[in-house]
Amino acid sequence: MARYFEYGDEAVAHLKARDPKLAQAIDVIGHVNREMMEEGDLFAAVVHHIIGQQISSAAQATVWARLQETLGAITPATVNAATLEQLQSCGTTFKKAGYIKGFAEKVESGEFDLDAVAHMSDAEAIAALSSLSGIGEWTAEMLLLFCLGRPDILSFGDLAIHRGMRMVYHHRKVTRQMFEKYRRRYSPYGSVASLYLWAVSHMDAPGYDRDYAPMTEAQKKAARKKRTAK
């Protein structure tokens, strides 16, 4: 059964009171139903994210289904019982198979305490998860948000978040200093703000169809061609 990131009126009221421009986007978009990962299964979530790096969602789903068929439950024990060749035969790269195998070995041996992550602060959990081979800061942040349901995650490394901010605030570029200003403004509901910025970034909400970033040369050329065609 699918589960969704839960938030209520308090989070929405806070964001709308703190940020009139984001409030407009919230009113246009309405409630966001964003699907979460399997509840409480951080090990499987890490493996799922490693598989999904630099491939499409459809390809990730295919590899994940094959891995489940091969291993049954995705646990440290079942991963460690498999060979690198068996993991790779599910459709992932040899490098990713190595990351997954190494992660499973660290968890099963006790070298990495996965259960402790749930009790860490956001910063501590991000540092711990991103210390693993194959897991960067952005992936760690997504694990906190979509597996553990942390309420205040806003990722500077997420390109869609940047696009959503440019569209909401009409910025040409979002610097780190600007980003941190928004982070403080949204806190303690950065995760909910993230949901709305992602929704805006899709460019299909009424009134939100323009990214204010400077056009690339290819985009300028396409725009000139379009004007000429008229």
Image: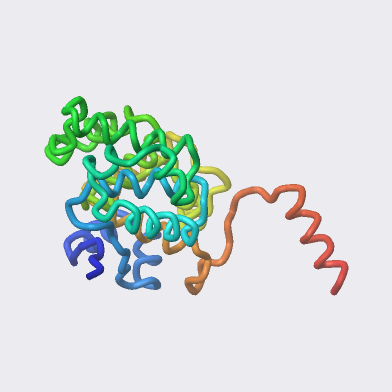
Task: Please provide percent x and percent y for residue 74.
Answer: 26, 50
Q: Quadrant of the N terminus?
A: bottom left
Give the residue displayed 32% in from the left and 27% down from the top. 131
Q: Residue furthest right?
A: 228
Task: Please provide percent x and percent y for residue 229.
Answer: 86, 71
Can you see residue 43?
yes
The tally of labels here is 0
Which of 104 and 191 lies nearest the eye of the viewer? 104
Q: Quadrant of residue 19?
A: bottom left
Tell me: residue 138, above or below residue 22.
Answer: above
**Direction from residue 194 to residue 212 in the image, left or right:** right
Q: Residue furthest top?
A: 111
Tell me: residue 30, above or below residue 132.
Answer: below
Question: Colour scheme in the image?
Answer: rainbow
Task: Please provide percent x and percent y for residue 134.
Answer: 40, 34
Give the residue displayed 51% in from the left and 71% down from the top. 204
Q: Quadrant of residue 184?
A: top left
Task: Please provide percent x and percent y for residue 44.
Answer: 27, 48
Give the residue displayed 39% in from the left and 34% down from the top. 99
Q: Quadrant of the C terminus?
A: bottom right
Give the residue displayed 38% in from the left and 71% down from the top. 29
Tell me: residue 211, above or below residue 124.
Answer: below
Which of 177 and 152 lies nearest the eye of the viewer? 152
Can you see residue 136?
no
